[in-house]
Image (spheres, rainbow, N blue to C red):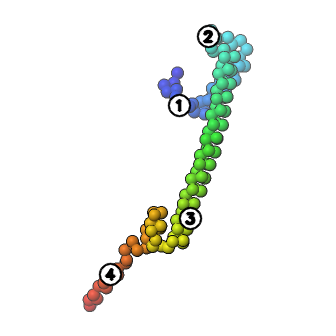
């Protein structure tokens, strides 16, 4: 028995288990003392595993699709906000209160550049 059974098995291990099960099915006189180790019981466990893995894969695909749709919607919203800011500037001007209301700086709020005095040339 594994120490941590809350993690998925590596694919290599599962493939090995499937090969072992195929070999076990080919043994004609296999009759274990424990009924839970019979070929029919192991086949039921295998079928259940495959069904649940298929369901998980489909759920993951649906999740990825929903995530892609949500991301697309986020970008559409973000681009609309950026374009609306441009529209506010175009409609009300670069120095309006409306520009400030949408989170942009007015032109008059920027510091003016001051030129540094030229250094005296020494010979």
Q: CA distance from mark 1 to mark 4?
A: 65 Å
Identify the mark at residue 34; answer none if there is no mark.
Answer: 2
Residue 116 place in picture, x, y as percent: 32, 81
Residue shown at 45%/73% (left/top)?
Answer: 95
Residue shown at 68%/24% (left/top)?
Answer: 47
Of marks 1 and 4, which one's residue comes earlier in the chain?
1
Q: Which residue is mark 4?
A: 116
Please state which of the two labelled residues, at mark 2 or mark 4, is closer to the viewer: 4
Residue 6 place in picture, x, y as percent: 52, 28
Toward the viewer: 82 or 55?
82
In the shown orientation, is residue 76 left or right of residue 39?
Answer: left
16 shown above or below 68 = above
Residue 9 place in picture, x, y as percent: 57, 30
Location of residue 14 by image quarter: top right
Q: Which residue is mark 1?
A: 7
Q: CA distance from mark 1 to mark 3?
A: 46 Å
Location of residue 79 by image quarter: bottom right
Toward the viewer: 48 or 59?
59
Q: Residues within 10 Å of mark 2 (few under 14, many from 20)?
A: few
């Amino acid at each position: 028995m594994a120490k941590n059974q809350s993690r998925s098995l590596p694919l290599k291990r599962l493939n090995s288990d499937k090969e072992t099960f195929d070999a076990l099915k080919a043994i004609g006189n296999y009759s274990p003392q424990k009924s839970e180790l019979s070929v029919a019981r192991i086949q039921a466990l295998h079928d259940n595993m495959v069904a649940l893995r298929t369901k998980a894969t489909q759920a993951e695909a649906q999740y990825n699709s929903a995530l892609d749709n949500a991301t697309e919607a986020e970008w559409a919203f973000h681009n609309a906000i950026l374009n609306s800011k441009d529209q506010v500037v175009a409609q009300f001007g670069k120095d309006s209160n409306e520009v400030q209301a949408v989170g942009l700086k007015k032109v008059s709020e920027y510091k003016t550049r001051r030129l540094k005095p030229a250094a005296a040339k020494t010979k």
